[in-house]
Amino acid sequence: MTKPKRKALPVTIEQKMELDLRIEGGNEEGLPEGWISERLAQLTTKIGSGSTPKGGSEAYKPQGVPLIRSMNIRFEGFKNDGLAYLDDAQAEKLSSVEVRSNDVLLNITGASIGRVTTAPEKMHGARVNQHVAIVRTSECLNPSYLNRFLASPSMQNLITESEAGATRQALTKEKIEGFQIPLPPLPEQLRIADKLDTLLSRVDAGRERLERVPKLIKRFRQSVLSAAVSGELTREWRGGGDAEWEATLLNSLAHSITDGDHQAPPQATSGIPFITISAINDATLRLEKSTRFVPPSYLAALKATRVAKLGDILFSVTGSICIPAIVNTDQPFVFQRHIAIIKPNFSKISGKCLYYFLASPEIRKQGEEMATGTAQPTVSLSSLKAFEIPLPSLPEQAEIVRRVEALFAFADRLEARYASALQSFNRLTPALLDKAFRGELVPQDPNDEPASVLLERIWAQRGASPKAKGGGKVAKAVGEGRTEPKRRGRPPGISTAIPETSSVEEAIRTLETQKLERAQGTRQVSLFGTED
């Protein structure tokens, strides 16, 4: 069965001559040989987005036709998390935005604007909502190449800068159609896409391995603290043998253990910082995290046991429990009742040694076992006072602190190297993408058909022409339950056959004849096919 000939949009003389000049004039300024720069509208067969069924999320079904939303679109690939489903009737209303495998899916609204990926084969037949645009490429543009280009730093900057300051970030269909795409020969597009897939998969694998480092460093620190509290860390220092330390109640190692004032403190616009657990949640006191202040008179009225001094230890007892932080400043501050304060008896235990012991997994386990409540676990002051703390001699405590700090300094250096390596990895992907779209990633083949020639041949074979410049938001694209806008042309039933053209010169003559006919009142017809 012979396929019906595809109808073409009318071509103008200006459009035709622009392409002819491009072919004769060679590559465009700044582009490699054989490349051209073309609007995305000329390289696609579809750009459009869908909608959300009436009733919103309550209308979604437990299974059926997938509805792709912005949360599913990730630079690293399509994610199934949060995938919604429609029944057949809902899907039918969105039949004009049916996804095909390898469609380019682009987020067009909100905080994730510009995020892009290609549709996997399993999403063939899915639909998209109004926050996602389908960009379906023609034969002259490889979808994987386009996906990588849209994810490149230059395009992401263009997208975000164009939407900066907008009340509601949104890419319109006109903006997407106007994206200028550096178009290499098709075989080179495939080489670039394949090379990027190979290199970026290695980058991702390396980043994945690198991102394990923080967990390993955390485990290393916890192991050091476990070795410290068990005596293993200083076994050699003692001359061998297990530690014979007496388990001592925390209350007997401190001058006092209490918590913050249970009454809501008065507020002031400036004065004494008032901290919550967020100021110690990484086991370090950070007064800069304070967001409230109390007047100096409030601090002056507090009992001495509730006034923090250098060397005291803060300990979270409600919510995020069992986080210690040593007071490392003379600056006055006050704290909420969810934080306890321990004033160590330095004649019995070093403040730093007690801090490291309290941070160990073994002491934390004691706190978790003593805590009451599930939604907001709480370690009471009586339970905190009953913690059993191993008590080495003061000289051994000093050695424990020295060794812990030396090993933690090593861990800090590892973290710094990790941070530096991660920055390098984060620069790799943008650098590779920029290099790819400058034509520097893969070798060029002089036997490749230039992109301009490819476009000319495809348009000629299809009997098609470059799409007319369009406008309007993607969310209002053709195919959202509305009919396609009518094209200008003869009324139905009137046909004018245009012979096939064998050369550019003949095409220009044909176009000039059509232009003259239009000036005399004759309707416009397409160059390479039947009119619409």
Image (cartoon, rainbow, N blue to C red):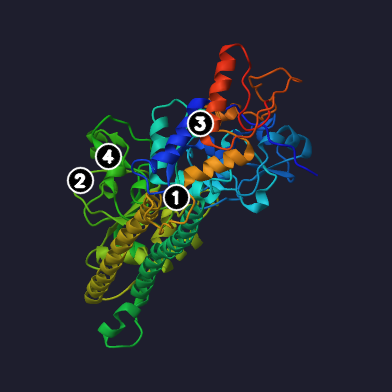
The residue under label 2 is 331
Give the residue number, with chain letter if any, for mark 4: 273
Which disc is residue 318 wearing? 1
Q: Is residue 425 left or right of residue 121?
A: left
Q: Which mark is residue 16?
A: 3
Task: Tell me where residue 338 appears, x and y as whole percent.
Answer: 40, 47
The amino acid sitting under disc 4 is Pro
Q: CA distance from mark 4 to mark 2?
A: 9 Å
Q: Are marks 1 and 3 in contact (CB under 8 Å)?
A: no
Query: Between marks 3 and 4, how big is the CA–CA gap?
Result: 72 Å
Task: First in sequence, mark 2 or 1: give its number.
Answer: 1
Q: Amino acid at mark 3?
A: Lys
Q: Residue shown at 26%/49% (left/top)?
A: 308
Q: Is residue 383 above or below residue 144?
A: below
> Reading the chain from its start, which is encountered first: label 4 or label 2?
4
Hey, which residue is sitting farthest bottom in the picture?
Answer: 240
**x and y percentages locating residue 179 in the rendered image:** 46, 36
Q: The residue tagged with tag 1: helix, strand or loop?
A: loop
